[in-house]
Amino acid sequence: MYFAKLEFFNPFSRSIKDRAVFNLIMNAMKRGDINGTRRLFEATSGNVGIAMAAMSNVFGIEFRAYLPKPTPNTTQTLLKVLGAEVVKTEFDVIDREMIEFVKKEAEKAKAVNLNQFENDDNFEAHYRYTAREIDEQLKSIGQEADVIVAGIGTSGHIAGLAKYFKERYGTKVVGVVPAKGEKIPGIKRLETKPKWFFEVEIDEVVEVTQREAIEGSIQVARRDGLLIGLSSGAVVKAFERIRDKYPGTAVLIFPDDGFKYVEAFERYLSGGR
């Protein structure tokens, strides 16, 4: 038996990143970090930027998004609709160099860089809230998670879930990353050194190609009528590989929906990569 956690029901970015960004902003405001400057700078390739732009509007904060070069046009357009200042950089991926670059840009402009990649408020959002919500939802139908399959990006959500469920149930946790040389929005290879991944126990990491991720998304769309994003499609394909190895109840984390990835679907359907 398996269940999917549909994180595209979150209202701002239609993604799991609403949880992390809300916690990042609220804790920064409680500490007084934002109150003086009212400006946020953040490195993002998608959902965090959209969530941060939306919530910045709610709180009356100016927001500047620094994007890696391959960021889809759809994401850039949505950020501009939300009123964010968009800076497209020459970085191919958000790595340590780009994170440090944005930190320095924020320091020069006297802005705040909440830094989703290193700020423990990201991890905390999933350990305290996402994990507990999944646990309570499963309990309500008399179930317990035997295995959780989730993508690895900043590693905030997979690490938060791993810590929570292993402490209570010894749940197996499987991570999903792009295959070598591949790019899948929202997930990254371990060479980027995602902070919290190395602080928890992950039982296995599965590599998936972009083509497989797209095919996983299309498969779910045509079977279940759900338009899921590419990292969700990657989770589907990873689960297919490991499902016999981890019997019992599985929970698949679907971080967002498919609407931001129309360009990738279009290329695939037209015979491109």
Image: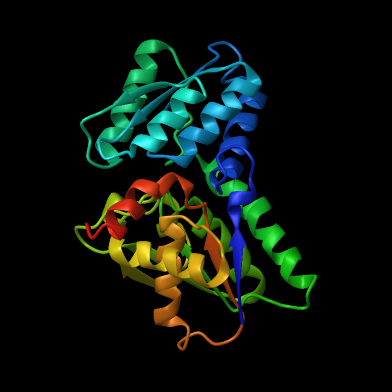
Picture mark count: 0
Where the C terminus falls, by quadrant?
A: bottom left
* Above or below 21: residue 154: below
Q: How is the image coloured?
A: rainbow
Residue depicted at x 46% and y 38%: 116
Where the N terminus falls, by quadrant?
A: bottom right
Q: Is residue 228 left or right of residue 11?
A: left
The quarter holding residue 178 reads: bottom left
Q: Position of residue 154 (x, y in %)?
A: 42, 48
The quarter holding residue 87 reads: top left
Q: Position of residue 120 (x, y in %)?
A: 52, 42
* Above or below 114: residue 233: below
Residue depicted at x 62% and y 36%: 22
Residue depicted at x 36% and y 50%: 185
In front: 183, or 165?
183
Residue 14 visible to the viewer:
yes
Q: Residue furthest front?
A: 270
The quarter holding residue 219 reads: bottom left
Q: Position of residue 228 (x, y in %)?
A: 50, 58
* Above or below 82: residue 253: below
Q: Position of residue 16 (x, y in %)?
A: 56, 49
In front: 203, or 80?
80
Residue depicted at x 43% and y 65%: 218
